[in-house]
Image (cartoon, rainbow, N blue to C red):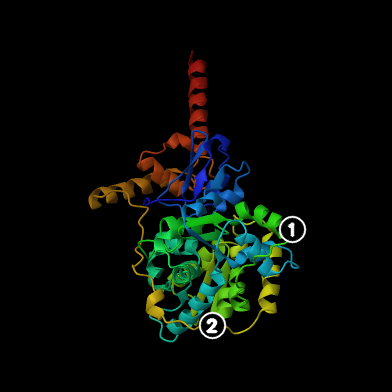
């Protein structure tokens, strides 16, 4: 694993340098230079916004191929509840899970089980919170966004493993008991709706390693599941976890609904999340106990590795949640401590100008001086997301003033004017 592993990648041969991506990136992680986009790994949070916006499909996400499951003696599929929203309402969840299992898995263990456990222990934390409001840790994009842009809010993040990690931990324990195999012989594969989950497995925050062995996108398995649904499957998935509240986690508002609290906010869409986090940081959000922040519009059903229209998928999840609405009793020989993050999440300074504090201050002054020269239009034509970002890029040596189309145009006009005057003098 590398420090800056990212699922989101650029296919340079498809990029035409259109600058659409730089305007959408919430952490200013993309630059366009010499007609091609470049992703700054230190800043990328794998939100997938560039994948959605790129008209050339030059941004993509890498995930594990299905064939990787055969590296293990016993294979367990770990589907997100989002998967259920990808199929027709008349298709029973147990059939979907059976069709998934038939792809070569030995068992299916739903992330919904982990969602109920996380809800249970989040309610426990809310009884005596250290900070308010608590911010959900279920969306890895939001956690990394806070780490980079809102470091003062790190202590507000719920310090509990995500439902994916909780489910993976329990799935491995169950499989060990069932098979007698060593934990390392058991492969746990998450079926993911988004690239951020892939990155959170390869490069986790709050833990040194993930309980998940691989991540396969919903997009890649969907056609295979559809094909299997047409077959008469005799070997059905062992159990369908029919908890409506847990299934509801797939859509925006599902987590907060499962907590059964009154003073909460649910925010979906990365731009809206940024606005709310800014409100919290400035102390403007009072009387709120819990905030569910989801980078994708409509929640996980809006992930860029899904196949169904997110509004349709959200509606399907709502109906499934209502259909199986019941209180599931959780019996575990574990406590909250067993599911807590093992490491503190630290701020990530991606705007560090220099290791030497004096040099950094000089560069900051230079950035201010260059910024004063720029038109403050934030048009993106220079290949940087804003005039402030261009000023920083110039001082750091990645760009120069001629990259600004406005200044370059004025420079050319002045040169032409001088040339005309010289010709007149002759």
Q: Residue at x 48, y 31 (%)?
A: 411
Q: Which residue: 55% across, 57% down? A: 194
In the displayed structure, does residue 205 sit left or right of residue 419?
A: left
Q: Nearer the viewer, residue 25 or 361?
A: 25
Q: Is residue 258 left or right of residue 85?
A: left
Q: Are marks 1 and 2 in contact (CB under 8 Å)?
A: no
Q: Is residue 249 above or below residue 10?
A: below
Q: How many marks?
A: 2
The residue beneath circle 1 is 230
Quadrant of residue 221 within the rendered picture? bottom right
- Residue located beneath label 2 in the image: 263
The residue positioned farthest toward the right in the image shown: 90
Residue 372 or residue 324, whichever sits in front = 324
* Helix, strand or loop under label 2: loop
Callout 2: 10 Å neighbours few (<14), some, many (20+)? few
| Residue 87 shows up from this direction | yes
Instruction: Where is residue 371? Give x, y as percent.
Output: 42, 46
Say whether residue 401 is left or right of residue 378: left
x, y percentage for residue 48? 55, 53
Q: Is residue 324 above or below residue 161?
A: below
Query: Upstream in the sequence, badge 1 or badge 2?
Result: 1
- Element marked by disc 1: loop
Q: Position of residue 113 (x, y in %)?
A: 54, 74
């Amino acid at each position: 694993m590398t420090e800056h592993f990212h699922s989101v990648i650029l296919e340079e041969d498809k990029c035409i340098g259109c600058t659409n991506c730089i305007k959408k990136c919430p952490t200013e992680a993309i630059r366009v230079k010499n007609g091609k986009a470049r992703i700054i790994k230190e800043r990328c949070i794998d939100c997938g916004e560039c994948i959605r916006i790129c008209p050339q499909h030059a941004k993509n996400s890498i995930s594990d191929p299905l064939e990787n499951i055969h590296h293990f003696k016993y294979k367990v599929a770990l589907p997100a509840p989002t998967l259920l929203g990808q199929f027709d309402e008349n298709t029973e969840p147990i059939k979907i899970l059976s069709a998934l299992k038939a792809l070569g898995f030995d068992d299916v263990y739903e992330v919904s089980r982990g969602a109920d456990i996380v809800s249970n222990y989040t309610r426990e934390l809310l009884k005596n919170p250290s900070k308010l409001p608590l911010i959900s840790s279920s969306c890895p994009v939001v956690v990394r966004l806070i780490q980079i842009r809102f470091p003062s809010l790190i202590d507000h993040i719920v310090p509990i493993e995500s439902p994916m990690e909780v489910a993976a931990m329990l799935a491995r324990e169950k499989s060990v008991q069932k098979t007698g195999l060593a934990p390392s012989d058991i492969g746990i594969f998450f079926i993911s709706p988004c690239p951020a989950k892939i990155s959170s497995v390869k490069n986790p925050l709050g833990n040194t390693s993930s309980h998940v062995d691989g991540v396969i996108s919903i997009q890649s398995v969907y056609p295979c599941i559809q094909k299997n649904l047409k077959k008469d499957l005799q070997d059905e998935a062992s159990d369908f976890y029919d908890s409506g509240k847990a299934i509801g986690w797939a859509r925006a508002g599902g987590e907060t609904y499962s907590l059964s609290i009154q003073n909460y906010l649910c925010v979906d869409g990365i731009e809206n999340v940024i606005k709310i986090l800014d409100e919290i940081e400035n102390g403007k959000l009072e009387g709120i106990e819990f905030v569910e922040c989801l980078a994708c519009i409509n929640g996980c059903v809006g992930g860029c590795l899904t196949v169904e229209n997110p509004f349709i998928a959200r509606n399907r999840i709502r109906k499934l949640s209502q259909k199986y609405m019941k209180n599931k009793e959780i019996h575990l020989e574990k406590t909250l401590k067993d599911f807590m993050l093992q490491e503190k999440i630290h701020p990530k300074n991606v705007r560090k100008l220099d290791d030497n504090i004096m040099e950094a201050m000089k560069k900051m002054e230079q950035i201010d001086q260059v910024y004063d020269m720029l038109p403050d239009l934030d048009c993106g034509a220079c290949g940087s997301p804003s005039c402030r970002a261009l000023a920083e890029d110039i001082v750091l040596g990645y760009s120069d003033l001629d990259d600004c189309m406005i200044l370059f145009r004025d420079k050319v006009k002045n040169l032409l004017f001088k040339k005309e005057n010289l010709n007149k003098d002759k």
